[in-house]
Amino acid sequence: MTRNDDAPRQLPLDLAHGSAHSRDDLIVTSSNERAVALVEAWPDWPSPITVLAGPAGSGKTHLAAIWAEATGAAAAPAGAIEPSFLALAETRPILIEDADRPGLDEKGLFHLINAVRGADSHLLLTARRFPLGWGVELPDLRSRLQASATVEIDEPDDMLLAGVLVKLFADRQVSVEPHVVQFITRRIERSLSTVQRVVEELDRAALERKSRITRPLAAEVVARFETGRN
């Protein structure tokens, strides 16, 4: 639905349009189809421990949220894996995001992996890199991680970026011409988080100016991202 641009407008309130992380919101292209297939194949996984690796903004959090919703998984913090999570692993899968960030609780993760294996359950870890690049110091943990299944989610391709742009605009009841979507797709950083920020900024700018989202407006907003002002 296209907004009525003749209607009076106030300056936009800072209302949150939360990130949609349901399966219905997921757009599947060649950049993420392998990761999507793995998530949807659960519980028929090749290993109880699975690592989903990919660059920032590639959609790992979205896929992890879909998996957690479908499986009832408990989310554990990578930096402090308390004994309570070992008990949880006996009854439900476990999710750990950003496992490759500094401060990983290596001993806690080692014991959690053992608990998951012992309970015939599953652990999904997300990271920017595969385990060999995490700098793990505990030899026993390195061995456990090397035995895990790994799947890579690639940098978003043009089709995925364009699809997400269109959906995010539609969620805001904004109609944007295809050539404007294509222009934005070619110019922005290849990151789903950047797509969301660009949509938010364009929607705000259009409301403030009481205008449609045109290519000149898109060029102005995208330029601010390119120069680091957003």
Image (cartoon, grey):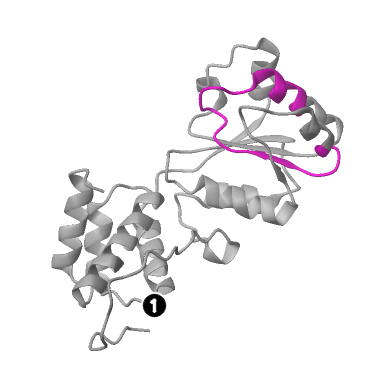
Helix, strand or loop at mark 1: loop
Residue 199 appearing in the image: yes
Q: Is residue 77 left or right of residue 58?
A: right
Query: Residue sitting at 68 percent across and 37 percent down?
Result: 76
Q: What residue is at 49 percent from the left and 43 percent from the top? A: 153
Residue at 34 percent of width and 55 percent of height: 197
Instruction: Write down the residue under mark 1.
Output: 173
Say which amino acid is labelled 1: Gln
Q: Which quadrant of the rendered structure holds the N terminus?
A: bottom left
In the rendered image, which quarter is residue 154 located in? top left
Q: Is residue 68 left or right of residue 201?
A: right
How many badges with numbers are in the image? 1
In the image, the segment drawn in magenta is 88-113
Question: Residue 10 is drawn in which quadrant?
Answer: bottom left
Judged left or right of residue 207, residue 127 is: right
Q: Is residue 46 magenta?
A: no
Inspect the magenta stretch and tell me whether residue 109 lies in it: yes
Instruction: Say if 57 sits above or below 169 in the image.
Output: above
**Residue 74, how many percent across, how many down?**
72, 44
Q: Callout 1: few (<14), some (14-19), or many (20+) C-alpha neighbours within 10 Å?
A: few
Query: Quadrant of the rendered structure where residue 137 is?
Result: top right
Frontmost residue, 217 versus 147: 217
Q: Position of residue 175 (x, y in %)?
A: 32, 77
14 in relation to 3, above or below: above
- Left/right of residue 162 with respect to residue 125 in the rendered view: left
